[in-house]
Amino acid sequence: MLRFLLPLLLTAAAAFAQTPSFDDSGNGQLQGAYAFRHVTWLVGDDAGNLDRAAAVYGTITFDGNGNYTLSGSAYDSDEQRVLPFTRTGTYRLSASGYGYLSNPVVTNARIYGLLSHSIFAGSSTDDELTDLFVASRTGSTGRFEGRYRIAEFSFPSSDITAVRNSTFEWSPDGQGNFGAIQATGFIASRADAITQNLNNIRYSLEGNEGLVTYGGTPGGSALLAGQRLFYPSADGSFVFGGSPAGFDFFVGVRVSNADAPGLLTGLFYQAGADIDASTLSDENYATLHTYYGSVNMNNGTAIGHQRVLTGFDEFAFDYSYTDQLSAGQGNTYDDFLGFRHFSSDDGFVRVGFGQNQTIGLTLSLRAPELAGTRVFLNPTGVVNAASSTPFTAGISRGAFLSLYGTNLSTSTAIDSNFPNTLGGVQVLINGQQAPLYVVSPGLINAVAPFNLTGDIARIEVNNNGQVSNAVTTFINATSPGVFTVPPGGAGYAAAQHTSDFSLVTPENPARPGETIAVYLTGLGDVRPPITAGTPGPTNPLSTTTVQTGTYLDGERATVTFSGLAPTLIGLYQINFVVPNNTPGGDRYLEVSGPDSYHSQALLPVAGAARAAAPKSPRRRGHPENRERKPSRNPDSQ
């Protein structure tokens, strides 16, 4: 019989489903004229070369009620000329700033993203489109001057080996002069860094749109060539843009020598695009990723989520990860994916540029501070109870949730029987009562009902007759999160040796060839089905209905059981055999579902020499052969 001897460790989770509409209470946050740029790159062959690309840019005006008008220009690789471009569309934004707008280029597609500090960034990952969209509030910038640090990602042609990125500084003097510019960066076909020097560079700025001419012809060994349109934000602290006739994208922030506050702490929204060129030299292909999501940093410990689409995949998946960050010179830090990030002086906006064989850029925005009176459920506070994966990851049926807010209950209560009402508190998900494990004024642990349907879940807390605001999020087939010791999602996996049910620890590590049991949440539907809040059955065992995979640093392990932990409530269990070739040391325990890949917890493995936790290749596309998952269709527009 399968057994579980660990204390129940909870920290976060999420859930959503059925027929409710996605929350639009944040529509009013997106109002007025914004400059925007939207670039779409479509992979056309097994090498990763592009089949087609398009860039659209100009002004998009939001009415605050869910409608927009767009006026600008478009450049398409098939047309090879700049044409006028106008569109009308719709958008929907939740209280957190998370939402979507109708894709102006592709009918019936959506750009999913997040808004903060008057910047919206996102991608159409769920509609099989590898793209990046950024919009920033326009307005009077006054004198455009100071010191700006920029990162650029560029496709000078359809050839994947020609993709490049660069970082450089602008120093506009308010009189049309940038002066000298030194750019450093990488080209996919080369392993070495490149430096390019440009002198006497000038710019023009009319209204909210600027133009800089670098000269030369894009391609070859040039990092910067041709022209770039640019758009300073209303306060001048942010700038972005790209070529009027090209498929590049750059973003930048105004910087100084001051230390940015909270550099490695806080919740950030993120979106980006990059090429993994590490496979070019020996396998002759490179992988394009585009994504949006969020990352929560706590004194350098980062737990993040990206909704990723690769150029080779048919649909997006949820990728969750951990990282340990340390501050470098000049408000910078590096992440394990190969990006070096730099921050604006106020710490609100961060830009990442790829290094070496990661070529790309990422934009991060500090999440807004959200608060409410009475019973308040934080719109960013629905997270995975095992892994603390941020709220953009959504939830799945049967998942443990952690709900954060204020005045959620009048006292603290715990009940291992998981009643539907605890301390006078109920959690309603699409009108259904969720079984409760813990209630307190700032945190509730609950289990998402198994009979949720659809793509959207609407969550409310009823505290003794006072009902909170409603928070919506997406329901996925799976949302895996491994419980950790200590709890929180960034430690060692809560795992046992099945031979004697002792804990797997650095002093008592797993051994190649043995079977290990790991405890987690978020594996979705089970067979035979059960009601949420009841113990996992023992005869027969209740197993997951979708295929799950387990890996150690990307090396696939044989799974012997995947299902509900018997006799326990709200927990899943995976039994797997440690691969015989697993090296000693701390290895990332990675779990996949058909629409997810989770890489956060560590598993100590016995070996001749213990090694530091590696920077494993934890995002190379989803490793499983997956069934097609329909694109999200939260509601018709």
Image (spheres, rainbow, N blue to C red):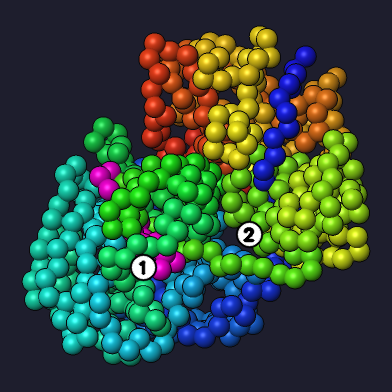
Q: Residues within 10 Å of mark 2 (few under 14, many from 20)?
A: many
Q: Which mark is residue 345?
A: 1
Tag 1–tag 2 contact (CB < 8 Å): no
Query: What's the residue type where badge 1 is placed?
Result: Asp
The correct choice, above or below, for 425 with respect to 620 in the image is below
Q: Position of residue 84 (x, y in %)?
A: 37, 83
Picture quarter containing residue 9? top right
Total count of labels: 2
Spatial CA span between label 1 and label 2: 25 Å
Residue displayed at 78% across by 61% down: 407
Residue displayed at 84% across by 52% down: 411
Residue 634 appears in the figure: no
Q: Which mark is residue 126?
A: none
Residue displayed at 91% across by 64% down: 465
Residue displayed at 67% across by 62% down: 379
The correct choice, above or below, for 584 with respect to 276 in the image is above
Query: What's the residue type where badge 2 is placed?
Result: Thr
247 relative position to 368: left or right: left
Q: Which residue is mark 2?
A: 380
On whether residue 352 falls in the magenta region, the answer is: yes
Read off the magenta span: 342-357
Q: Secondary structure at mark 2?
A: strand
Q: Position of residue 275 (x, y in %)?
A: 34, 49
- Quadrant in the picture for the C terminus: bottom right
